[in-house]
Image (cartoon, rainbow, N blue to C red):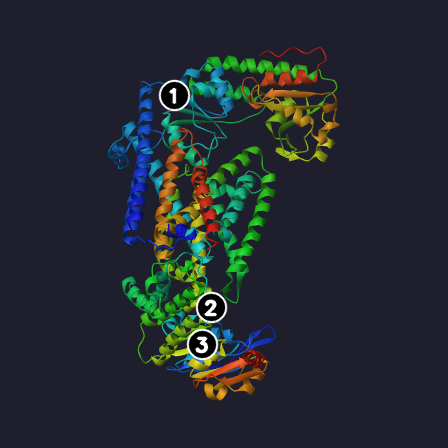
């Protein structure tokens, strides 16, 4: 707000709302969107059916309509909402952490290779899963793709960190450049593999790269639970450290921040969180950029506000986008990536344009 | 007492710092001067614990910096680097409060803000706290960073018996004459309050006016240290800086160090008048 | 503080409004579903896959279909009259359930797998139909679908007719003296043609029509360079059309440098056929193969295809 005003020459004081108010309002919005996500769906089953659905789940009601309510509310919408919240929170927090680490509001988790690695693994699973890699992939059944995507992302990030580390110190600049190189490499490998794909597999690849939460299930919710807990545990430990990083690495060290630990913790958390999110929902862009950006507009760049705030805001964004994705062309469904890009692209543009005005600040 | 014992820094085969021993004493302002590339900033980064020496070690009250956790070190020394750019739009107050950012400080924001406001007042920026840092002039920004370093030392939980060190690299570089004086007075006051202050500075006149001790560096070595009156002599300075320098009286009991080429021009100009 | 609070108020209001809009429309669609809700015992079929829909229509079961997927292109009325649950490889579990099917007949291509798993777990009867692009596979599919929906007699009749058509096709194929080779061009993008190699539906229909696949050296649908194209030298080029408006892809293919010297281009031997007709492998497959055959082998002695 103030930055925009003063960037065209006006000098004014910053407005910073109380952090508690901001969190309270965001949490309220999150609850509201979660309730909407539970209440809205193409079947028209409403929240009023919730007691019956629970009764059916507990085995007290076994007529067909209660069973259907249970299926829609508890087995479809609830895991979907929870997964949307996780994916949004994971992507937004990771985006905020990477922006802090690289000191650049346009940084994105893709910089540490996790997305390109996950994409390469996904392409390989989709294309080779029917061919030479079938015996390798078959035992994992329908979870082969998420598992492959997760480990693909993790392995790529670990490789990058190994490349960028020298004598126990991680060089952020090297990481950035190596990340670009690895991204290009896995992109070309992916292109090579997808050349061998048939048009059906190609369609699958395209759909995967646009993201979707339609495959949400309790298994997936359980699978991401450890990552959600990890984010909750790690993020509070990184907030002050990343604040220091905004002044520069040396300055962060002067302020008493263990910079190597902060870097590694942020990168490991991002790799795990984004890897898990990509694994369960495919590629979902813009959340990692938009949520932290909006949080900085509201609360300023202090990570004690930006990190938790982005997590909540990211969850809200993905939940709402998912509601739109499932309702817009019901009973068919839009890929959520399309919905988010529709919102995200203009915001991104706004961000870039404003950066130019304020002289790259 | 912050003490470097026979430290060297290698960059490949080149010695950036060559067997330097230096003691920064509490209550005194030690100014490090020397030509460009002498290794002044590198020495400051070693003394700050930021750079690990290839040989030798730095000790704070006898404790090896290498063994000291950074959070602990941060309670006992703060640093103003040569140029610090902030990549996100912090307000002035938020920037200063970053000085109290160390988790180990365990200080509440409200308390930190009180100290931060004092520090801002001390650098003459009392009314700037809600301004955005990236809209300030270079000089104002520099003073904010000094305030941040002061805030760090003021909020750190630390017994009085321990040395608190303040290390500054060219803090007056982008300041006008008045603010050069204001900032150095402030730094000087820090030393008289008992802090060990290390100041890397180019301006020999400012060093001469404020320092309790001068350290003269050239080519990674200390070529002289001591009381300003003893050290700031024409021969040593001229030899170290590689050009003819004159030390002249300012007329009011002070001392002015100027290149001979410039003093000559001044004389010619005066004569022409 | 004031500014931010106001922003929050606006954001919350907007979100609530969006939610209300969405929920009223949800209620509307729910009401719609309730209106259309069948009396107990009525079969409500969700047909997933172009061939499945085509067979159901051919069996006269169209009134039992409540929804189809976007690949159900024939008859054209299917996508007009029925709800669409979207592309069959990108289904949504709640979207599928919202049309309240009692029976889902799905091509084995339906996905994503997690969604199919969830739908199967919902208790709705779900039948996979294998995709067999052979002369035997098509009547098999018809009989299987007939059994599922209890239209055995009609299915037997239709299957027998398809088998007879294929037998006639077989007969005609034996009379071909000099086999020709044709190239199936799926698309032309950036001056490169994507052609149908072995293992594709195009390859299967070419074989049935007694035509050699010029792109037999390629596996699947692949983009090939002009140089490769020149090597293939097909006698004819086959392209798909999507309705009347789509008439230029064939000319585009023939104008590719790699094909300009081919017999196909010299003789302007271009076959344009509707995609679902040519590659759908539904009841019309023998007829499509026959058309293709007739297009290439214009010598006399061919029995006309019986549509």
> Whole-percent x and y of residue C25?
33, 28
Q: In this picture, is A68 found above or below C62?
A: below
- The chain that hosts pointer 2 is B
Identify which residue is drawn at 49% across, 29% down. Answer: C108
Identify which residue is drawn at 53% across, 21% down. Answer: C140
- Which mark lies nearer to you, 3 or 2? 2
Badge 3 local density, few (<14 within 10 Å), some, or many (20+)? many
Q: Nearer the viewer, residue B128 or A262?
A: B128
- The chain that hosts pointer 1 is C
Q: Which residue is mark 2?
A: B174
Residue C44's mark? 1
> Whole-percent x and y of residue B123?
36, 69
Looking at this view, name the residue that lies furthest to the bottom: B230
Question: Alpha carbon of mark 1 to alpha carbon of mark 2: how far?
Answer: 80 Å
Q: In this picture, is B114 found above or below C56?
A: below
Q: Are marks 1 and 3 in one subunit?
A: no
**Could you tell me if the residues under marks 3 and 2 are in contact, i.e. CB atoms within 8 Å?**
no
Q: Nearer the viewer, residue C158 or A147?
A: A147
> Whole-percent x and y of residue C13?
30, 39
Q: Nearer the viewer, residue A329 or B218?
A: B218
Q: In this picture, is B102 found above or below B189?
A: above
**Could you tell me if the residues under marks 1 and 2 are in contact, i.e. CB atoms within 8 Å?**
no
Q: Which residue is mark 3?
A: B199
Question: Alpha carbon of mark 1 to alpha carbon of mark 3: how far?
Answer: 85 Å
SS under mark 2: loop
> Whole-percent x and y of residue B94?
35, 61
Q: Quadrant of residue C94?
A: top left
SS under mark 3: strand
- Which mark lies nearer to you, 1 or 2? 2
SS under mark 1: loop
Badge 1 local density, few (<14 within 10 Å), some, or many (20+)? some
Identify which residue is drawn at 53% across, 34% down. Answer: A203
């Amino acid at each position: 707000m103030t930055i925009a005003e003063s960037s065209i020459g006006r000098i004014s004081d910053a407005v910073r709302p109380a952090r508690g108010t901001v969190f309270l309002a965001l949490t309220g919005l999150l609850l509201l969107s979660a309730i909407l996500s539970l209440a809205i769906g193409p079947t028209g089953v409403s929240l009023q059916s919730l007691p019956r659905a629970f009764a059916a789940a507990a085995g007290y009601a076994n007529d067909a309509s209660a069973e259907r309510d249970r299926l829609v509310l508890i087995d479809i919408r609830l895991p979907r909402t929870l997964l949307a919240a996780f994916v949004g929170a994971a992507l937004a927090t990771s985006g905020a952490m990477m922006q802090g680490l690289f000191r650049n509001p346009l940084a994105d988790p893709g910089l540490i290779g996790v997305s390109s690695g996950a994409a390469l693994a996904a392409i390989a699973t989709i294309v080779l899963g029917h061919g030479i890699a079938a015996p390798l992939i078959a035992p994992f059944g329908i979870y082969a793709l998420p598992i492959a995507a997760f480990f693909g992302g993790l392995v790529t990030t670990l490789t990058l960190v190994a490349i960028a580390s020298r004598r126990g110190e991680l060089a952020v600049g090297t990481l950035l450049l190596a990340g670009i190189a690895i991204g290009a490499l896995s992109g070309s490998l992916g292109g090579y593999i997808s050349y061998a794909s048939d048009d059906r597999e190609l369609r699958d690849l395209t759909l995967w790269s646009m993201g979707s939460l339609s495959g949400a299930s309790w298994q997936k919710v359980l699978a991401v639970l450890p990552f959600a807990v990890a984010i909750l545990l790690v993020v509070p430990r990184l907030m002050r450290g990343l604040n220091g990083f905004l002044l520069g690495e040396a300055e962060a060290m002067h302020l008493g921040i263990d910079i190597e630990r902060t870097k590694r913790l942020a990168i490991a958390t991002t790799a795990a969180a984004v890897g898990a999110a990509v694994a369960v929902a495919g590629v979902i862009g813009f959340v990692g950029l938009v949520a932290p950006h909006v949080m900085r507009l509201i609360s300023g760049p202090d990570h004690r506000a930006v990190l938790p705030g982005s997590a909540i805001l990211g969850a809200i964004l993905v939940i709402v986008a998912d509601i739109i994705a499932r309702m817009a062309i019901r009973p068919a469904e839009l890929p959520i990536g399309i919905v988010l890009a529709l919102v995200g692209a203009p915001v991104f543009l706004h961000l870039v344009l404003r950066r130019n005005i304020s002289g790259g600040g | 007492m912050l003490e470097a014992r026979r430290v060297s820094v290698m960059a490949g085969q080149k010695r950036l710092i060559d067997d330097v021993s230096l003691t920064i004493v509490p209550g005194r302002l030690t100014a490090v001067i020397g030509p460009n590339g002498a290794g002044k900033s590198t020495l400051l980064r070693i003394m700050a614990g930021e750079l690990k020496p290839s040989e030798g070690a730095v000790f704070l009250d006898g404790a090896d910096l290498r063994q000291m956790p950074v959070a602990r070190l941060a309670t006992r020394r703060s640093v103003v680097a040569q140029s610090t750019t902030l990549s996100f739009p912090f307000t002035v107050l938020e920037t200063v409060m970053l000085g109290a950012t160390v988790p180990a400080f365990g200080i509440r924001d409200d308390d930190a803000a009180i100290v931060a406001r004092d520090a801002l007042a001390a650098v003459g920026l009392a009314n700037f706290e809600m301004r955005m840092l990236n809209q300030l002039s270079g000089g104002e920004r520099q003073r904010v960073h000094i305030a941040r370093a002061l805030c760090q030392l003021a909020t750190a939980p630390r017994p009085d018996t321990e040395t608190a060190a303040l290390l500054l690299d060219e803090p007056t570089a982008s300041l006008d004459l008045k603010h050069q004086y204001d900032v150095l007075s402030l730094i000087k006051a820090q030393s008289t309050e008992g802090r060990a202050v290390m100041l890397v500075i180019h301006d020999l006149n400012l060093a001469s006016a404020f320092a309790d001790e001068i350290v003269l560096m050239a080519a990674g070595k200390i070529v002289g240290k001591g009381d300003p009156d003893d050290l700031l002599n024409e021969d040593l300075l001229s030899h170290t800086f590689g050009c003819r320098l004159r030390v002249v009286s300012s007329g009011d009991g002070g001392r002015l160090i100027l290149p001979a080429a410039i003093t000559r021009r001044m004389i010619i100009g005066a004569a022409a008048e | 503080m004031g500014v931010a609070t106001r922003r929050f108020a606006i954001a919350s209001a907007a979100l609530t409004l969006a939610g209300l809009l969405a929920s009223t429309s949800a209620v509307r669609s729910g009401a719609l579903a309730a209106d259309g809700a069948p009396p107990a015992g009525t079969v409500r079929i969700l047909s997933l896959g172009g061939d499945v829909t085509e067979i159901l229509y051919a069996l006269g079961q169209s009134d039992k279909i409540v929804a189809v997927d976007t690949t159900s292109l024939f008859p054209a009325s299917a996508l007009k009259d029925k709800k669409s649950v979207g592309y069959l490889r990108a289904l949504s579990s709640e979207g599928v359930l919202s049309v309240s099917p009692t029976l889902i007949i799905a091509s084995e291509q339906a996905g994503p797998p997690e969604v199919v798993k969830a739908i199967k777990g919902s208790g709705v009867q779900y039948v996979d139909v294998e995709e067999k692009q052979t002369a035997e596979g098509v009547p098999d599919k018809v009989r299987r679908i007939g059994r599922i929906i209890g239209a055995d007699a009609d299915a037997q009749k239709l299957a027998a007719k398809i088998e007879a058509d294929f037998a006639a096709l077989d007969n005609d194929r034996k009379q071909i003296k000099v086999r020709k080779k044709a190239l199936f061009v799926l698309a032309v993008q950036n001056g490169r043609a994507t052609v149908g190699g072995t293992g594709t539906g195009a390859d299967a229909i070419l074989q049935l029509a007694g035509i050699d696949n010029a792109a037999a050296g390629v596996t699947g649908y692949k983009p090939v360079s002009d140089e490769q194209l020149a090597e293939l030298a097909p006698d004819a080029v086959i392209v798909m059309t999507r309705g009347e408006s789509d008439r230029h892809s064939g000319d585009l293919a023939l104008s590719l440098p790699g094909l300009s010297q081919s017999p196909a281009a010299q003789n302007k031997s271009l076959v344009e056929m509707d995609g679902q007709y040519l590659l759908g492998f539904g009841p019309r497959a023998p007829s499509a193969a026959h058309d293709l055959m007739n297009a290439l082998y214009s010598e006399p002695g061919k029995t006309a295809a019986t549509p």
